[in-house]
Image (cartoon, rainbow, N blue to C red):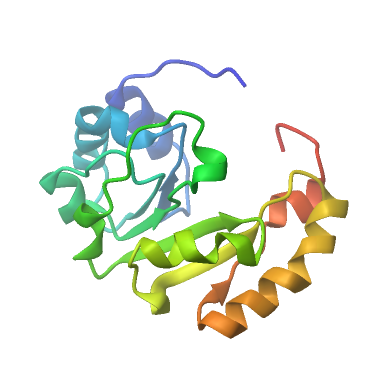
Amino acid sequence: MGGIECSPQEVAGLLACQSGWNRLVVTGGEPLMQAKELEELFSLLPKEVKIEVETNGSVEPTPALIERVMTWNVSPKLLHARSGRGALILNAFRTLPNVWYKIVVRGEEDWAEVEALQLPRTRVMLMPCAADRERYRALLPEVAQMCMRHGVRLSPRLHVELWDTQLGC
């Protein structure tokens, strides 16, 4: 999608110019591939800023990040979506109390793989695997039933529902 390259100091400066914010959500690619830069950025932000990091669980978080991040949103990719990405490093997240696992599923056929991850069900959210609104709406009831059967939560994919296949929203 593009973007601009900025140093942690430049990002902190841009954020300092904004008023009325107290939460920062860092998402990817894979943000933990830039752990050193994130540590530096987070050290420059006021302590009141609540930080969330969205990761796919393939890179272990550093102790400094674990200490500073308020919420981890870990979205481990199942085999149908991995396409050669690295192995999951979920053990580093399992012991943390502030982790939510958001997993994209195609349906009940993915449950065995979800269960094999051995995640706390109270922190698992399933999302329908759909790149467009029509497929999303068709799959949502099945995934909702799956969540009820297995005692996990359902997470909507609002970007698909709201903007369909449009990029850059």
Q: Where is residue 119 in the image (x, y as percent from the top left)?
A: 34, 68
Residue 127, by quadrant, is bottom right
The answer to which of 94 and 39 lies nearer the viewer is 94
Relative placement, left or right, of 128 versus 77 is right
Residue drawn at x 48%, y 65% as measured from the top left:
112
The answer to which of 14 and 114 lies nearer the viewer is 114
Whether residue 80 is visible? yes
Relative placement, left or right, of 46 versus 4 is left
Residue drawn at x 55%, y 41% as measured from the top left:
81
Q: Where is residue 105 in the image (x, y as percent from the top left)?
A: 60, 57
12 lies above or below 121: above
Residue drawn at x 28%, y 25% as measured from the top left:
9
Residue drawn at x 45%, y 53% as measured from the top left:
21
Whether residue 47 is visible? no
Number of marks in the rendered image:
0
The answer to which of 98 and 6 lies nearer the viewer is 98
Q: Which residue lies furthest to the left in this view?
A: 63
Residue 23, by quadrant, is bottom left
Location of the N terminus by quadrant is top right
Q: Position of residue 145 (x, y in %)?
A: 68, 79
157 lies above or below 120: above
The answer to which of 130 and 69 lies nearer the viewer is 130
98 lies above or below 80: below
Q: Position of residue 121 (x, y in %)?
A: 41, 76
Location of the C terminus by quadrant is top right
